[in-house]
Amino acid sequence: MEQELISKNKFRAVAIIGAGPAGCICAHYLQANGILPVIFEFGKPLRTLLPTGGGRCNLAHAEFDFKELAKNYPRGEKFLYSVFSKFGTAQTLEFFNSIGIKTYTQDDNRVFPVSNSSADVREKLLKSISKCKIIKEKVMEIKKPDNCFKIKTNKASYAFDCVVIATGGHENFEIFPGLKINEPVQSLVGLVTKEDFTSLAGVCLRNVEIEGLKGDILFTHKGVSGPLIYKFSSINARKNMPYAMKVIIACYDLQKELDKNPHKEIKNLLGQIVPKSFAVLVLGRLGIDIDMPCHKINGITRDKIVKMLTGFEINVVGKVPDSEVVTCGGVDLNQINPKTMEAKDIPGLYFCGEVLDIDGFCGGFNLQNCWSTGAIAAEAIKKPTS
């Protein structure tokens, strides 16, 4: 039998599909304004929050200019102008302070809870929505045949005045038919390479550059990973493979160093600026004796080394399966009002978080999307119906 949960007073009866970061902050602000939404979550609430920031929970990024903040989203930048102008980093920190989460900012501007514990953040956020009912059922279908939304789960059917979709960016897009969905693909992800870097697994190249982006690269058994690779893979999430990328590792006067260290073996000289194991790989690629003393390195050989260090080619053939930090894709933003997070053609249907075609770099940006869009949806919903 269908459970009619439609509100009979001036406030709307609200269902939130998904108890992730976006759904929970939306529930928090609704509860604070006298609306107790019903949350549908088949899994563990806020389970995706626990591994963030290596378990420390990178809540946000200390960028307080909304346009500068939005630049960290390869997809969604312009859409987020309106969102972040209303609920940005400052409002996020105020929110966490209000629920008992003190924060601090690292030198790289990443914001963490003082407890350095995702579990602590999860506990306090769930406590802040303790009055909301969480139904452990899987939503199978959402329809709007008349003036209300009909929700069908694996166990029952329900009716609500409005619905917030906060299901994340990986699946369940089929529950709300009729909207354009941009196919989800891996975004922040390690890359599989044609080259075998097994001998370098765990080795890190610091402060290198790829196509104007700067950061660190980590070699793995399957290819490359690390902060710079995540950023590069995010920007090029839909780029056709295979493709080559060139890494600028070092720009310096090699001849000057050769002259200063004539008796040093070339592998040891290069090992002063890059990890020695990487220096050995470079010299091996070039067919140069790794034990050759520097005074025997002629101009041609020197130029070969410089060319490789300033344009080390890596051939990308794929993405590491099931390793993405976040996906790009989801509900096409042209269908959503950025001022309310409501579907333009379906009044009463709202979207927030990674279910939208919005994704950011590492550093707290993807959680910021969840906090901000969830809060904006709540702000729009809390207004009394006419």
Image: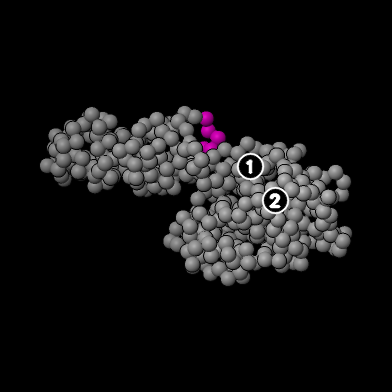
Q: How many marks?
A: 2
Q: Amino acid at mark 1?
A: Glu
Which-is-in-front pick, marks 1 and 2?
2
> What number is the disc on residue 137?
2
Relative horizontal placement of residue 232, taking residue 25 as reference (left or right): left
Query: Residue 156, image x and y in percent?
Result: 77, 49
231 in relation to 33, above or below: above
Q: Amino acid at mark 2?
A: Glu
Q: Residues within 10 Å of mark 1 (few under 14, many from 20)?
A: few
Query: Residue 81, image x and y in percent?
Result: 64, 52
- For the point 46% across and 55% down, the residue is 54
Query: Residue 321, image x and y in percent?
Result: 49, 37
Q: Residues within 10 Å of mark 2 (few under 14, many from 20)?
A: some
Q: How is the image coloured?
A: one colour
Secondary element at image label 2: loop
- CA gap, disc 1 to disc 2? 16 Å
Residue 142 inside the magenta-drawn segment? no
> Magenta residues?
235-240
- For the point 14% across and 43% down, the residue is 264
- For the point 29% across and 40% down, the residue is 278
The residue pinned by badge 1 equals 171
